[in-house]
Every structure is written in structure tokens, then in C-alpha cells.
């Protein structure tokens, strides 16, 4: 084995993660409607993978075909080839899973049909529906010298027809099948619960849209476009930055296609013509037997809401036992640190604290970084209230939060209108930190209350993602948080902090120092331990240091949900490293770093994954957990996750994953147990 065998390509590792999502859709232990959701997530994940990662590889091919990534030394072309082979394998599994799920839906009284499987009595009804409700709304295009090939929108579905007449050569007809006026599902009067997709209806009646042609063959098509655009590289200094981001969004919608999906086989010559028009290679064309977009699954799930056995048992975030009802959150945080664990515990205490700060006469300012927000954000509401109440409110709204740019632009406008001081980040760096600083004045002196978390200030995702949020009145932490904000307001980053971990200059190097500390312990013959929980691991510098630590005898346990470019258990290199992934009902999003054993263990929670983009290309913040009780809670979280035998997968030395199964053992599902514990603690304090 060589050192290179310790590493995995980033893109292939991501595909292994999405395979784990697909496994949830395949798992018969998971309730049916939840399996539908997992299959929908698998497909939306894959769409984003093409738009961002495959799009980026295509861009790299144009810049330097011979460039090699730093882990497996693959060129962009080699990565593309390997990814597309793997994607086709996964899509075959997806198609098989889709058929299994549709059979299971049929047992629940829901059927999806096409024109091959309806009764003769239904066709007149569907014909009437098409001619009266849809035909007037459709815009058929016939490609010719005078009618150029139309622009095909990203991820929308189009009906494609091969057309001929007695006098002309074959032409291509294109009809958009998406639109706000179209209902995706059309009820078929065969029996209750029988539906047809609108694109299948349009495809069947294409001859009515092209009356002067004969339809030789037809298919449904869906285009995926590259979304990898560098907002800073294209920045025009003559534009307001927010106006520039509006332009970036507009340009992204028109970037080049990188994938074409077809629902049926059509003549190869026609596929070649479509590829020529869209500037695609034939390898970028995918033919499926399943619908090109399975978002309609959510409509089926809505119809089955009355069947509790088809869903996970309902769970609701509980109040923290660390906090008393009816007493100021600000005052309680002054008494002791509070650690909230979402979704098991509610985000409400933080929202209450922000609401209090907006109205508290002793509060003079609120500073906050915003990356992703809920569509109906209480956070923005309270910041607006604070500004209107005369507080000084500084808000950094990250306009480069991918696919949330439009939402953030609108939030920034609303905050500005209310009198908040809004800034938009730093050139060439995303501000990804989850940081809030409330300043009170006591006896003429500032007093700081700081919140630092692992997840976004999004009330909706706080019920779906596992995250940690520290509320503290530690004044040293507060002063350093102020230093971070003051640097951001100047368009700069901090170069030195004592307490916090702050990327891009004071996080990666501090992590290396912490790992070196454990290496020194191991070399001195003492017990040495590193425990890490992150979403992704791809930072080569940190991975090299972890390999060094493993070789020195440091025991390393890592919980990595998604991308993991390090392989555990490679003889001679990573023998002392264990890596596992948990993919379950809730998306594992919290980041925990722990270094040491026993009383000397140093714990941190942070917004940063161990990826180069987080450690040196973003502003991220990590915070030490000092309270002994909170340290024990973090230790308990890590311990329980390692005992999971339901949602956990162990990474093998070849980079593959093997799912743990309970067998004769008691089932341990860490997420269920965390919720059970939250309910138990809430009931003991009489609060829910």
C-alpha cells in the first residue's frame, strides 16, 4: 500500500454519499412515504451535483485538461469519466427503486398511468381535458432556418417530436411542459387515486400541436445547466454589489447545458442533432424509464397523510431543560452557558433571546451573520424590530450563498429599509459563520452575549437538521466575536484570536496545532485521542496531518456524513482511524471537534467542515466549549452515535461503506434516542 491509497476522489466520494441516501429509499424498514422523500432527495442531490460539480469539471477541462487534483491525481477528464460511469450505475438502481415504490403506492390506492395502461373509456375525457385546458396554453416550436432552436430552461421538461411531411426532410418540434398554469398530476376517471403526469398527456397529443406534420417519434427531455459561476471574478466595480448578484443569477440561468435526460429512446440521428444544438457530447445524454422529475411524490404523500404507518412518527422539538420558562433568556445566559441541540431541542430560546434584545433598553447593538434563512424568517423580523427601536444593527448578509442568492437579496433590502446596516461579505471569501453578538451596557460598560452555532438561522431547517448552538456570556469570547465583526465591517478578516477558531487565518493552523498536541502525547507513550464530527472531509493538509497522527499512534474516530476523501484502516497509514457516516431521518449537520482524553479534552463546535473551501476560503467560526456539563453532553453525543446500528455505515479501507445492522442486538437509532431523551428531560421539568 502507498500513501496515495489513503485518499479518495472528492466527486466519487460524494456519489458514495448519495448512494447512502438511495439506500434509505430502498430500505423496507423505512415507512413508504419517507422512502419517497429519500428518492426525491437523491434526485435533487444529483441535479445539484451536475449543476455544480460536473459543471466545475467541464470548466476545468476548458482551462487545463492536464491539471490533476491533489488527492488521487486524476485529471478533470478522468474524473468526469469515472463520475458518469458511477452515475449511470446509481440511476439504474434508482429506476429499480422507483418501480418498487410505485408498486407499493398502488397497494395504497394510488396509481400513475400512461396511455398504454388506461381504459378506452378514459381517453375521451383526457382528450377533452387536453383540448380545453392545456392546448390553449402550449407554445409548440418547429425548428427551421426562420425558427431557431429555443432556449431550454434548466431542469424544465420539454416534449420533443420528430416531424415529417411528404415534401420536407425531418424536423424537430419542441413543446414546453412546465409552467405555473400546469397541474403536474391529472386525475384519470378510471378509479379513485389514478393519475397521469401532465408531460405524458402533452406527449400523447403532440399530433394536435403539429397538424401539418406526421409525428415519427417522440420523447420527453430535461436539460441540466452548469451553475458554477464565480461571482467575484465577474464583479463589475461600477455596479452596486447587490445589483451585481442579480446579474450573476440571471447569467447562471443561461450557462451551458451539461446533461440531457430523455424518457424514451428516439432515433440516434435526432439525438445527435439535439446534442449539436445544445453543444453536448453523446456521453452527456441519459435515457430513463422513469419520470424525469419525481417532485410529484410530495403530492402523493400529502394524500396519504391520514396513514400514520406510512410516515415516521411525529416528533416536535422540545424546550431546553437548561432554561426556565417565564424568565429572561438574556439574564439566564448571563448566569450559565446554554447549548441547544437541534432538532431535538427547539430554536425558540434563541429566537426569544433575539426578540428580547430588540426590546431590552440595556441592549445597544446586535451584530449578526446571515447565510440561509427561512422563507418567513423570525430572525429578520426581530432584527427589523431592533433597528426600529433605535438599536444599532449590523447584519452581514451573504449574497453568495449558492441557490439562496435571490432570497438573501430580498432580505437585505428589507433589513436596509428598516434601518439596519447591511454589508454583503468579503471579496473572494464567503462568510459562512453562524455568529450573533448582543451588546448590553452595564454601569456604562459593554457586556457581551454571544451565540455561535453550527447551522443556519433557519427555523424550518432547525426541525430537520441536527445542529448545535451555544449561548454564552463569556466576555473573552464576546470580545473576540466583536473583533470578528469589526474586521468584517472593514472588509477584512482577523489574523489573531486566542479563544475562537476563525477561518481563513486562524482555524486550519489551530487545528493542526491541536493534532500535533495529540501526536506529542502519543509519542510520549500517553493515551491520545481525536474525535471529529463533520459533514465533509477533503482538506489535504488536515488529512495528511491525520495520517501522521495515526502513524504516531493517535486513535482517531471520525463521523463524516458526506464527502470523505480519507480512507480508514489502510495498513501502515490509517490503521488507527475509524470513519463512519450516519444518514437517517434528520440530516446530520453539526460539527464537533474534540482533542484529548479525560479531563484534558478540548471541545469545539463550529460552522466549518474540514474542507479547503471552509478552512481557508471562507469566514468560519468555531468556539471552545468550556462548561464541564456541556462537555459531557458533547461526549455523550459522540458516544451514542458510535453505538448506532440502524443508520450508521462503517467506511472500509477501499472507501466503500457497509451498513450496520442490529441482528440479535437491540436496535440503536441515535436520532430516535436523542429525541426520546429530549422528551424525557422536558417532561421532568414539566415543559414541552
Image: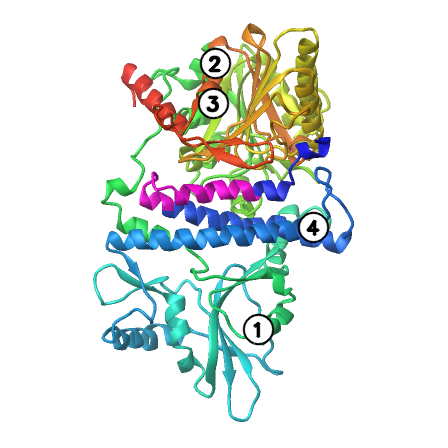
Query: Which of the two discs, 3 and 2, labels the residue nearer the N terminus?
Result: 2
- Span shown in magenta: 15-35
Few, some or many residues within 10 Å of mark 2 (<14, 14–19, 20+): some
The percent coordinates of residue 344 (x first, y second) are 38, 26
Residue bearing mark 1: 268
Query: Which of the two discs, 3 and 1, labels the residue nearer the N terminus?
Result: 1
Few, some or many residues within 10 Å of mark 4 (<14, 14–19, 20+): some
Residue bearing mark 4: 78
Residue bearing mark 2: 630
Image marks 3 and 4: residues in contact by CB distance under 8 Å: no
The percent coordinates of residue 423 (x first, y second) are 62, 37
Q: Secondary structure at mark 1?
A: helix
Image marks 3 and 1: residues in contact by CB distance under 8 Å: no
Quarter occupied by the N terminus: top right
Q: Is residue 179 above or below residue 456?
A: below
Few, some or many residues within 10 Å of mark 1 (<14, 14–19, 20+): few
Q: Secondary structure at mark 3?
A: helix
Q: Distance from label 2 to label 4 (Cα)?
A: 46 Å
Mark seen at residue 642: 3
156, 671: nearer the viewer: 671
Amino acid at each position: 500500500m502507498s500513501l496515495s491509497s489513503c485518499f479518495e476522489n472528492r466527486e466519487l466520494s460524494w456519489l458514495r454519499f448519495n448512494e447512502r441516501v438511495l439506500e434509505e429509499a430502498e430500505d423496507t424498514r423505512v415507512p413508504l412515504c419517507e422512502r419517497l422523500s429519500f428518492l426525491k432527495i437523491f434526485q435533487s442531490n444529483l441535479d445539484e451535483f451536475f449543476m455544480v460539480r460536473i459543471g466545475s469539471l467541464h470548466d476545468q477541462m476548458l482551462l487545463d485538461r492536464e491539471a490533476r487534483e491533489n488527492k488521487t491525481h486524476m485529471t478533470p477528464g478522468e474524473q468526469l469519466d469515472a463520475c458518469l460511469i458511477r452515475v449511470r450505475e446509481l440511476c439504474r438502481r434508482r429506476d429499480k427503486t422507483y418501480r418498487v415504490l410505485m408498486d407499493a403506492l398502488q397497494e395504497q390506492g394510488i396509481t400513475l398511468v400512461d396511455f398504454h395502461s388506461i381504459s378506452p373509456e378514459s381517453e375521451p375525457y383526457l382528450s377533452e381535458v387536453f383540448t380545453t385546458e392545456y392546448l390553449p396554453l402550449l407554445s409548440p416550436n418547429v425548428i427551421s432556418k426562420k425558427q431557431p432552436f429555443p432556449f431550454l430552461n434548466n431542469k424544465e421538461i420539454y416534449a420533443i417530436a420528430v416531424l415529417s411531411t411528404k415534401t420536407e426532410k425531418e424536423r424537430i418540434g419542441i413543446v414546453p411542459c412546465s409552467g405555473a398554469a400546469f397541474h403536474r398530476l391529472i386525475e384519470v376517471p378510471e378509479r379513485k387515486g389514478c393519475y397521469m403526469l401532465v408531460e405524458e398527456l402533452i406527449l400523447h397529443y403532440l399530433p394536435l400541436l403539429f397538424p401539418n406534420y406526421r409525428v415519427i417519434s417522440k420523447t420527453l427531455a430535461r436539460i441540466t445547466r452548469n451553475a458554477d459561476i464565480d461571482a467575484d471574478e465577474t464583479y463589475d466595480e461600477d455596479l452596486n454589489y447587490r445589483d451585481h448578484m442579480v446579474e450573476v443569477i440571471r447569467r447562471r440561468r443561461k450557462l451551458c447545458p451539461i446533461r440531457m435526460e430523455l424518457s424514451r429512446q428516439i432515433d440516434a440521428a435526432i439525438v445527435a442533432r439535439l446534442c449539436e444544438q445544445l453543444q453536448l457530447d453523446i456521453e452527456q445524454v441519459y435515457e430513463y424509464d422513469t419520470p424525469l422529475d419525481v417532485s410529484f411524490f410530495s403530492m402523493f404523500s400529502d394524500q396519504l397523510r391520514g396513514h400514520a404507518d406510512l410516515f415516521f412518527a411525529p416528533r416536535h422539538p422540545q424546550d431546553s431543560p437548561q432554561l426556565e420558562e417565564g424568565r429572561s433568556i438574556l439574564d439566564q445566559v448571563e448566569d450559565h452557558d446554554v447549548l441547544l441541540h437541534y432538532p431535538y431541542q427547539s430554536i425558540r430560546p434563541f429566537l426569544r433571546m433575539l426578540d428580547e434584545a430588540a426590546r431590552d433598553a440595556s441592549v445597544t447593538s446586535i451584530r449578526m451573520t446571515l447565510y440561509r434563512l427561512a422563507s418567513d424568517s423570525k430572525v429578520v423580523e426581530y432584527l427589523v424590530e431592533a433597528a426600529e427601536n433605535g438599536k444599532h444593527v449590523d447584519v452581514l448578509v451573504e449574497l453568495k450563498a449558492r441557490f439562496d442568492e435571490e432570497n438573501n437579496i430580498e432580505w437585505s433590502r428589507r433589513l436596509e429599509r428598516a434601518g439596519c446596516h447591511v454589508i454583503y461579505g468579503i471579496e473572494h471569501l464567503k462568510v459562512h459563520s453562524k455568529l450573533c453578538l448582543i451588546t448590553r451596557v452595564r454601569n456604562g460598560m459593554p457586556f457581551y452575549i454571544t451565540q455561535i452555532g453550527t447551522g443556519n438561522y433557519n427555523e424550518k431547517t432547525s426541525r430537520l437538521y441536527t445542529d448545535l448552538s451555544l449561548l454564552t456570556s463569556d466576555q473573552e469570547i464576546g470580545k473576540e466575536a466583536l473583533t470578528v465583526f469589526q474586521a468584517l465591517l472593514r472588509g477584512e478578516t482577523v489574523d489573531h484570536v486566542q479563544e475562537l477558531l476563525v477561518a481563513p487565518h486562524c482555524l486550519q493552523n489551530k487545528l493542526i496545532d491541536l493534532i500535533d498536541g495529540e501526536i506529542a502525547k502519543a509519542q510520549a507513550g500517553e493515551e491520545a485521542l481525536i474525535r471529529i464530527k463533520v459533514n465533509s472531509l477533503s482538506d489535504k493538509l488536515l488529512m495528511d496531518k491525520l495520517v501522521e497522527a495515526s502513524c504516531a499512534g493517535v486513535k482517531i474516530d471520525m463521523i463524516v456524513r458526506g464527502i470523505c476523501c480519507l480512507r480508514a484502516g489502510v495498513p501502515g497509514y490509517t490503521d488507527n482511524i475509524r470513519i463512519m457516516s450516519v444518514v437517517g431521518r434528520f440530516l446530520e449537520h453539526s460539527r464537533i471537534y474534540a482533542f484529548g482524553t479525560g479531563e484534558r479534552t478540548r471541545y469545539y463546535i463550529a460552522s466549518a467542515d474540514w474542507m479547503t473551501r471552509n478552512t481557508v476560503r471562507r469566514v468560519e467560526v468555531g468556539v471552545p466549549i468550556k462548561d464541564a456539563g456541556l462537555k459531557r453532553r458533547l461526549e455523550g453525543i459522540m458516544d451514542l452515535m458510535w453505538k448506532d446500528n440502524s443508520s450508521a455505515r462503517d467506511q472500509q479501507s477501499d472507501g466503500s461503506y457497509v451498513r450496520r445492522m442490529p441482528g440479535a442486538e437491540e436496535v440503536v437509532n441515535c436520532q430516535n434516542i436523542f429525541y426520546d431523551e429530549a422528551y424525557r428531560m422536558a417532561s421532568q421539568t414539566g415543559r414541552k
